[in-house]
Image (tube, helix red, strand yellow):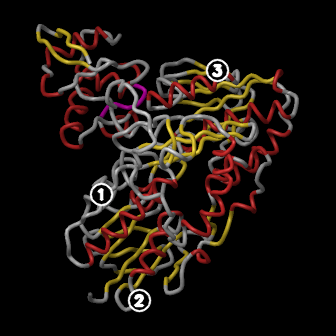
Amino acid sequence: MTSTVIAGKTVEVNDEGFLVDPNEWTEEMATELAELHGVATPLTDRHWVVINYMRKEYFENGTGATVRKLGKASGVDTKELFQLFPKGPAKLSAMIAGIPKPKGCI
Amino acid sequence: MMHKRMVILGAGTGGTLAANRLRKRFSTAELEIDVVDQDNQHIYQPGLLFVPFGLTEPDDIVRKRDRQLHKGINYHQSEIESVDVEADEVHLANGTTLAYDLLLISTGTKLLPEETEGLDGPGWNRDVFTFYDLPGATALAERLANFDSGHLVINFFDLPIKCPVAPLEFAFLADWYFHDRGVRDDIKITYVTPLDGAFTKPAASATLSNLLEEKGINLVTEFTTGEVDTVGKKLISYDGTEVEFDLAVVIPLHGGADYVHNSPGLGDELGFIPCDNKTLQSTVKPNIFVLGDAADVPTSKAGSVTHFEGEVLVENIDAFLHEREMVERFDGHANCFIETGYSKALLIDFNYETEPLPGHFPGPVGLPLLKESRINHLGKLMFQSFYWHGLLPGRDVPGIGSHMPETGKHELQTTGKS
């Protein structure tokens, strides 16, 4: 765990770069987190559909959604998810949304 | 206690062991138990891994479902149409309606090959196979026996899948099998995964990556298959990259049983049942419980998990029927033998909170964890007999409880919480 400054605010991140406390996240951090992890900016409305869905899922269910759940329920289909968040939509959108890596991945 | 009616959907690992344990605990006057399944073939699913390599005959891993149930349990063979959550009723395809006071859902998970584009193409069961069902494993055995050169690709499309280590075991066994047949030098093996490593948890992922490398198996990570071209013989990922193959062994996407989608309010988008991951009581309605792969809990979909959950579940059902607080807590305990070929296996043991660690199981003197050994392989082979004669009838195993043991494990520097 290390401290780092994102969008002018000092926050704790784990070894993979996920924010330790989702409550410390602000919307301003999203763009900087995206740039840091190879997601094209500026973030579009479609990115935000996914980011907001992930935060909602986390606060309601204690974990962000997996790719398959995102594809079925977020309003953005799997193909587009991979265009928005190349390589790993669930992992990257969780990272940018300031929540932990989604569970159910075991 | 008043007379109660219980319906159990699914007579696989979970439904069978729960029915038998509950039958022992309650008299038929106290609890009437009806079990439903769509067929009468109970498959020992860990055995499917061995079928393609000719190490097990298909007949050896199948028994009748109703024969595994104790006396005093009613068995219905029918597809399930739907569950009426409001009315506390199950509708069967054969026209029967079963009313219940208590419902247990243990219908597991099914393969959804139709959810991956192209997978139903002409090359299916010719150059593209799965070993996750009996017909597939049987067909693959014949194909493997005649495969002497080329590129074998093993790929699971996305989690959740049953027994997430099985695709890796398949890769290890394929390496051994081709060596044994003297053709290994002419065959390239590649393991393709949507994950960012060989496995989900750091310590086990590192060990398993090393094993892949030692055995000369290539690893392709972060590849999420969106399409399979069964004629052009390539996997195509959602971001457009391709992996070519001569023979592909794939694990299709998984979902809950069909009737879940016909039952308003019962399941989530994937057809799994949301439940409290410690008590296994559904969040749908208090009189619905979930056991095994059908549950949406953040641990492996595996027989060992179902086994450990079963003990917790029976206590909680007892509490529910007596209108007491639920006391038993499931910790996510999973325990898996991983076949690595050459009559060796390694063992991993973990739960919701603790990743698989090295050490010994179940205590300081025991089977080696996260390390290849012959004794683990023997353990895996002996388990089949225990499955039919111990686990399903509901016998307890001395020394192995539902909760994950902590003694005997080596602490690791934690590499970030997962």
Say which amino acid is labelled 1: Arg
Q: Are marks 3 and 2 in contact (CB under 8 Å)?
A: no
Looking at the picture, do discs 1 and 3 lie on one chain?
A: yes
Q: Who is closer to the viewer here, B361 or B114?
A: B361
Q: Who is closer to the viewer here, B349 or B104?
A: B349
Say which amino acid is labelled 2: Thr
In magenta stretch: residue A78? yes
Give the number of the mark in front: 3 or 2.
3
Vertical placement of residue B137 versus B220, above or below: below
Q: Pick whichever of labels 1 and 3 is earlier in the sequence.
A: 3
Give the labeled residue for mark 3: B213
Vertical placement of residue B285 versus B109, above or below: below
Q: Secondary structure at mark 1?
A: loop
Q: Are marks 1 and 3 in contact (CB under 8 Å)?
A: no
Q: Secondary structure at mark 2?
A: loop
Q: Residue B383: give x, y in percent of width and height.
A: 63, 57
How many discs appear? Answer: 3
Say which amino acid is labelled 3: Glu
Seen at 41% across and 44% down, the residue is B407
Looking at the picture, do discs 1 and 2 lie on one chain?
A: yes
